[in-house]
Image (cartoon, grey):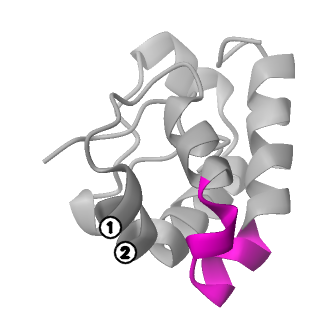
Amino acid sequence: MPRFSVSSIPALALAGLASVSAALPVASSAQAQVSPQLRGEAIALMQVCRGDYDRLCAGVQPGGGRVLACLQNHANQLSAACGQAMPRAQSLRDSAAAAGVAPK
C-alpha cells in the first residue's frame, strides 16, 4: 500500500494515512523539524481523505506534492469532509515547505 511523504498531502500536508500507521514516512532529519502539532493535524487530515485517496489517487506516487495535487484535481469528486479539509491541507503543505521539510 502506498505511503505518503512529508510533501504529499500538505504534507495531506504531510501525509501518509493514519490507518497506514501514523503514516508519515519522512527522513529522520525532517521529522525532527516537524512539530507534533503539525504532524497531528496532518494525520487527522489523512484520516479524513483516506477514502478519497484510495478511490481517486491510489496510483499516484507520493512525494513532491503529487497526492495533494491529485486530490485538488478531483475536487468535484471529493467527499464533503475531504473537500472541506483541502484548504487546511494546502496550508499545512505550505508550512512544511516554508520550514524546509517539503519541496517548495
Image location of residue 93, percent across then percent down: 74, 37
Q: Where's residue 3, x and y in %? A: 28, 41
Of circles 2 and 1, the one toward us is 1
Q: CA distance from mark 2 to mark 1?
A: 6 Å
The quarter of the picture where residue 26 lies is top left
Query: What range is drawn magenta here?
Result: 74-85
Residue 25 in percent (x, y) is at 34, 32
Q: Secondary structure at mark 1?
A: helix
Amino acid found under the numbered disc labelled 1: Arg
Residue annotated with mark 2: 51
Front-most of residues 99 and 77: 77
Q: Is residue 4 left or right of residue 95?
A: left
The answer to whether mark 2 and mark 1 are in CB contact below 8 A is yes
Magenta stretch holds residue 79: yes
Q: Is residue 81 above or below residue 34?
A: below
Magenta includes 104? Answer: no
Report the residue marked by disc 1: 55
Q: Nearer the viewer, residue 22 or 13?
A: 13
Q: Residue at x 39, y 59 (%)?
A: 56
Residue at left offset 62%, top offset 38%: 69
